[in-house]
Amino acid sequence: MAGSRHPQDTETKPDRGARLSLQGVSRCFNGPAVLDGLDLEIASGEFLALLGPSGCGKSTLLRLIAGLDQPDAGTIERDDPEAALAYVFQDASLMPWRSVLGNVALPLELGGTSRGERDARVAALLDTVGLTDAAHRFPGELSGGMRMRVSLARALVTQPALLLLDEPFAALDEFTRQYLDEHLQQLWLERGMTVVFVTHSISEAVFLADRVIVMSPADGRLVRDFRVDLPRPRLAATRTGIDFTRQVQMLADTLREHSLHA
Amino acid sequence: MKAPTPEVWLPPVISLVAITAFLEGWLALTAVPGYLMPRPSAVMGALIASGQELLRATLQTALTASAGLLASAVLGGLAAVLLCIHPWIRRAFYPYAVFFQTVPIVAIAPMLVIWFGFGPKAVMASAFIVSVFPIIANTLSGLLSADPALRDLFRIYRAGRLTTLLKLQIPGALPQFLTGLRIASGLAVIGAIVGEFVADTWENGGGIGTAVMIAIKEQRTDKVFAAVLMAALLGLLFFALVNVLSRTAMRRWRLGELSE
């Protein structure tokens, strides 16, 4: 299915990615602060991975950026608060009573896009993500990997300037996960939106991101801001390269150091 | 659909034949009088002799029970939607829904006669009262348990309360509504029969419950059993029909349930 790209289509022309500025962000839930005075600048079109073990606050941070939760202190600013934002959950979270088409059209439907335009945009998007043949099938009939692709398509249908993903491929098997990582990179290269990707997999973070933010459960803030040095597009072979392995090792050391302190 | 193999249908057939034969022989040997306990052959005889009358009565009960069940589905579903809107509404009105569950139908059936007179209207009301609660309770829990991630998604796309209700909560509550309907289908038949015991006469059309009452008064135990058998079969038929209905409605969803 991969490779059905149409670089000349207006549909896939890169959008300008959102720029984000987080200052002094704190959040606690009846206990020690999950996030404590966190500062972070995210550039337009950047692919950022939030990496850390469970309970380090990376999902909390993502929900704050999405506006699904409010910080106890600090500010989160987007350059254009009206620009479209999309969120991909850990599970595909599709509506079992709607076909693939109906699920992908949902954000446009909620945004009040007219039926004709909706159908055209959904059809074009399903084509770019290679789901055209599955358009009239239902989530129950699809594999886990297919469902996650539908979920990605649903997120992309509004042409978001900011794409937030919360451990989206964590429940999938290794092969499907690597395949979807490559697919996501391709979509990002074509569209140029800003991506914030939460993961607890070091290799996934290094493979995908321009920049990896390491978080630790003890601190409630960032313990390392790491710029990945690997050429794009990154391919299956990238994962076996010496540069890749070295950078994964560096991040693994950072994580180990901070969990030993905890 | 595959035809059932003998492994599936043979055991219940054998048990039915064995139990019937045992009852027949045992009742003949001990010479229990027929007015205390009729032999299966006598019940079959009554079933054949009064077949037309019993079939008409069963049909009548089927009609009133389905009318009551339909009212339960529509009004119970609407009530659940109203209750899901706000916790305050639930606190204020859910106790009245529970009232339908706990009210002894036999005790208020005479009131139904006063309100609706003898006949099908009172019987329908009885079927409705008995069957509405499972629909309210199940549908409500379905409406309130929408996938949290999908709720977040609706928030991200700034969907209003009404849109969330119509596009997420109501369609998402379909499985629980159907579970409620399945429970309600059996109860509606029971409710109709209890209603007929108290609030129906042969002159007003009379259902299978009326037939049981009359047979009891005539001390025709064989006919009582024949009528009870018909009533049980009717309940079974209702249950089976609702099952087919839910399978059809859930065909696409079910595939997902099976694959996970």
Image (cartoon, coloured by chain):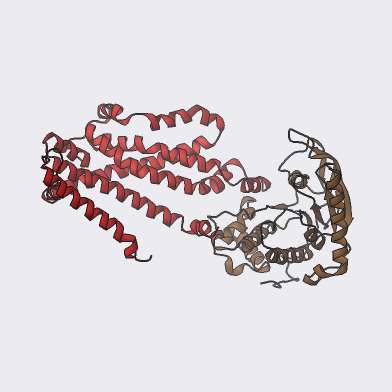
Chain colours: A brown, B red
Q: Is residue B89 above or below residue B61?
A: above
Q: Position of residue B152 (x, y in %)?
A: 65, 46
Q: Residue at coordinates 42% horizontally, 43% vertically from top-left?
A: B180
Q: Is residue B38 above or below residue A31?
A: below
Q: Residue at coordinates 85% horizontally, 46% vertically from top-left?
A: A260
Looking at the rendering, which quadrant does residue B132 occupy?
top left
**Residue A160 shows in the view:** yes
**Residue B68 shows in the view:** no
Q: Residue at coordinates 55% horizontally, 29% vertically from top-left?
A: B88
Task: Specify whether A37 is left or right of B170.
Answer: right
Q: Position of residue B157 (x, y in %)?
A: 67, 48
Total labels: the figure holds 0
Q: Is residue B249 above or below residue B137?
A: below
Q: Is residue B111 above or below residue B29?
A: above
The quadrant in which the C terminus of chain B is found is: bottom right
Q: Position of residue B209 (x, y in %)?
A: 22, 39
Residue lying furthest front: B29
Task: Specify whether A120 is left or right of B56.
Answer: right
The quadrant in which the N terminus of chain B is found is: bottom left
Q: Residue at coordinates 77% horizontally, 46% vertically from top-left?
A: A65
Q: Nearer the viewer, residue A94 or A170?
A: A170
Task: Specify whether B58 is left or right of A114.
Answer: left
Q: Position of residue A69 (x, y in %)?
A: 72, 40
